[in-house]
Image (tube, rainbow, N blue to C red):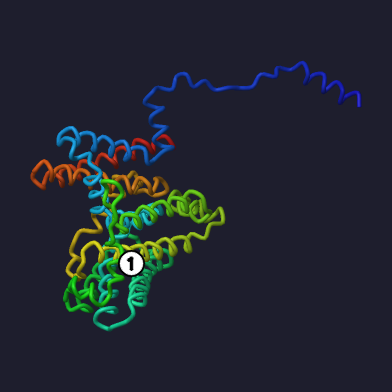
Amino acid sequence: MTGAQEFERVLDSSDKSVASFEHQDVTLLKRIQHFLHSTPAAVPLIVLVMAIIIFGIAIGGRFFSAYTLTLVLQQIAIVGILGAAQTLVILTAGIDLSIGVIMVISAVIMGNCAIIYGMPTPIAIIAGMIAGGACGLLNGFLVANMKLPPFIVTLGTWNIVMATNFIYSANETIRDTDVDEQAPLLHFFAISFRLGGAVLTLGVIAMVLLVVGLWYVLNHTAWGRHVYAVGDDPEAAKLSGIQTKKVLLAVYGVSGLIAAFAAWVSIGRNGSISPSSAVTDFNLQAITATVIGGISLFGGRGSILGTLFGAMIVGVVSMGLNMLGADPQWKVLLTGVLIIGAVAIDQWIRKVSA
């Protein structure tokens, strides 16, 4: 007992100061780097605001009108939805090159079931959603279970789905008038309404709600944390008890479902249903929005809100250049600069965690 008391007296007389680390030498550049690392959507948001200000000054007040800015949202609705699907895949350090043609074949199936086969429109929509989900699950199975590289898998399924799309449809377009007469529900997301000077469509509302919903899932659910963990370090995720195969299968399956949902929105946006739209670079546009939005191609980092901002940046640049009467190739040039810049900034930010 006496020994214990002597020990306590020694502790009482010992130095109680706590070690501390001074951060006064942290430069402003380092502080910015840490801020951008902890807030991945900040960079695309800053670029978006700057683009709006620059084009607003160059064009004048009409660019700042509610109608012009909401027109940008209408134009990016499809790319924004596909970008949300692409974000899920890229967060797992993968990529989906087939997402655009999955959307097109889902639209073709919806149109054929409703117009050609005379099925009830809700059943036709469900059939298209099932087709999109099945394509996504096929990608997920080949990546998760067969251990094949996502780039090679989705490049292969891109060719398979595109060819199937043309064979199944015989490359016949379903006209806008036929959809209006026989299956008006397919044009549901074309419904528009005014909000002051702004004109919004249900397709824009659907895009925003989808992005916000996925943001909540990715940031406030266990599944969302698992997606980030698998993309950051799959082996560490597996050792921590995460079923990486199921996560990857779910991610690609959900991505296919979202692409099928984008098909429904695209029918409302385009009016007609054309199988030949499969040759449009929807894949590239979705990847562009995702990369510019700050989603790391190495996986495990980024915010889906950034993808929405990335799609809006491309839309604002395109609208601004059109209003200025510039050569369309300037849009391509600026998009390339933005992509390279986004990847360079991502590499610089990742040094914080290195």
Q: Which residue is mark 1?
A: 260
Residue under the point 34% across and 60% down: 150
In x, y percent, where is residue 88? 39, 55
Q: Residue at x 41, y 54 (%)?
A: 92
* Res. 30 image quadrant: top left
Residue 234 shows up from this direction:
no
Q: Amino acid at mark 1?
A: Ala
Is 309 left, or right, of 213 in this rendering?
left
Q: Quadrant of the C terminus?
A: top left
Image coordinates for residue 316, horizontal then vertical, percent: 22, 44
Residue 48 horizontal/vertical position (percent) = 28, 39
At x 47% / y 60%, what residue is drawn?
247
Q: State whether residue 91 is above or below residue 160.
A: above
Local crowd at mark 1 within 10 Å, few (<14), some, or many (≥20)?
A: many
Asked if 58 appears above or below 205 in the picture, the reply is above
In depth, the one of 342 and 141 nearer the eye is: 342
Task: Inspect this view and state whether residue 1 appears.
Answer: yes
Question: Is residue 32 left or right of 201 when viewed as pictured?
Answer: right
SS type, badge 1: helix
Image quadrant in which the N terminus is located: top right
Depth check: 66 or 31 in front? 66
Q: Residue furthest bottom?
A: 117
Percent coordinates x, y for residue 294 in the rendering: 34, 44
Where 69 falls versus 214 (above or below)?
A: above
Q: Residue at x 21, y 66 (%)?
A: 271
